[in-house]
Image: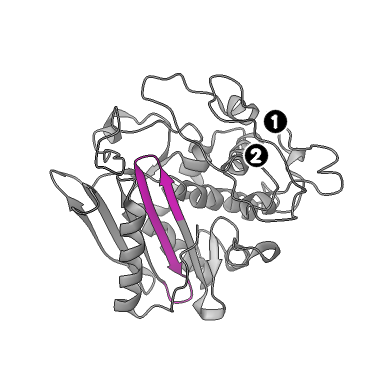
Amino acid sequence: MAALYITAASVALVENGKIAWSRTFGVGLERKPIYQAASLSKFVAAIVALRLVQDGVLSLDAPVDDKLGVWKSARPPLTDGRPVTLRWLLSMRAGVNVPGFGGYAIGDSLPTLAQILNGTPPANSPRVQVVTPPGERYAYSGGGYEIVEALIADATGKPLADVAEERVFEPLGMTDSIFAARLPPALASRAATGHISDGKELPGGWRLMPELAAAGLWSTTDDLARLLVAVSAGYAGRPGALLGRAIVTEMLTPQGGGPYGLGAAVAGTGADVALMKRGQNVGYQGYLILFPAHGNGMVVMTGSDNGSTLSDALIRRAGEVYGWPLLGRLED
């Protein structure tokens, strides 16, 4: 951590379907900090969407425009006969642009979801739109997850933050997780400060991320580990699991031959299949991995632009220590 100028890092390890241990490393941390989850937000947003699929509110394969009101994905002729679906959005195969978002300074005006999707001021990112035929190829897209956010809101009549709380966070006891651009004071006092690669603190402590589904979750390693435990329980078909085995099996199936399942990258086969997701916002980086058949995995979160280096090293070392299947490249 000293060599990488990382002032705060948290780790939670899942073993045999339970949280085995968790620790936070850093100076002057009185309580376990919360972090910007960055693109780990996409994995959590995908879980919310899949819970709605399981509950019959959404469909994986229906055109999303059937329920979208605030914005439409159809863009003839690219989408003629090949509509955007939730399956394609979650697996990064919807042909949607805007890979990522840079965030906003603490004092900036923030765009609404509609302004983010349309690329209108004060949004600082391009219009989200289909640029290649849906289903044709894999292309990482934060913009696609903003469409998912709009789909969840339009289908339920509630914002993503409320649906996530009701359908995922509360049932799993994820009391330190929230989709929010601006943190409530109680959580802001516990937020780990973000740092750039030379160790300098971000002005104001962090950048604001109104693109909630793509990058706007705040959470802890313990909470995300609870989610990994829930996915593993669903894979095992345990009664009362947040997601049933059929949905989890879909998550773990590479879609269209690409590297992604539904909500995360997937590698390996059979009992050694792994689910992987990297998070990288300005000032915050982390990683999570789960071998659902074994109930083993890890979550690492840091307040640093160098956090991926630490996360990758810790996960590879954990694989050696705990006898996980051999890992190739750690996917996004």
Find residue 97 and report its image quarter.
Answer: top right
Secondary structure at badge 1 equals loop
Q: Which residue is drawn at 26% across and 38% down?
A: 193
Q: Residue at x 62, y 52 (%)?
A: 90
Find residue 181 and report its image quarter.
Answer: top left
Q: Nearer the viewer, residue 143 or 169?
A: 143
Q: Residues within 10 Å of mark 1 (few under 14, many from 20)?
A: some
Q: What stretch is highlighted in magenta?
A: 278-295
Residue 32 in percent (x, y) is at 22, 48
Residue 241 in percent (x, y) is at 50, 63
Residue 177 in percent (x, y) is at 38, 44
Residue 22 sits above or below residue 58 on the image: below
Residue 174 seen in this snapshot: no
Q: Nearer the viewer, residue 218 or 307?
A: 307
Residue 289 seen in this snapshot: yes
Residue 13 sits above or below residue 93 on the image: below
Residue with the mark numbered 1:
71
Seen in the image, is 134 located left or right of residue 253?
right
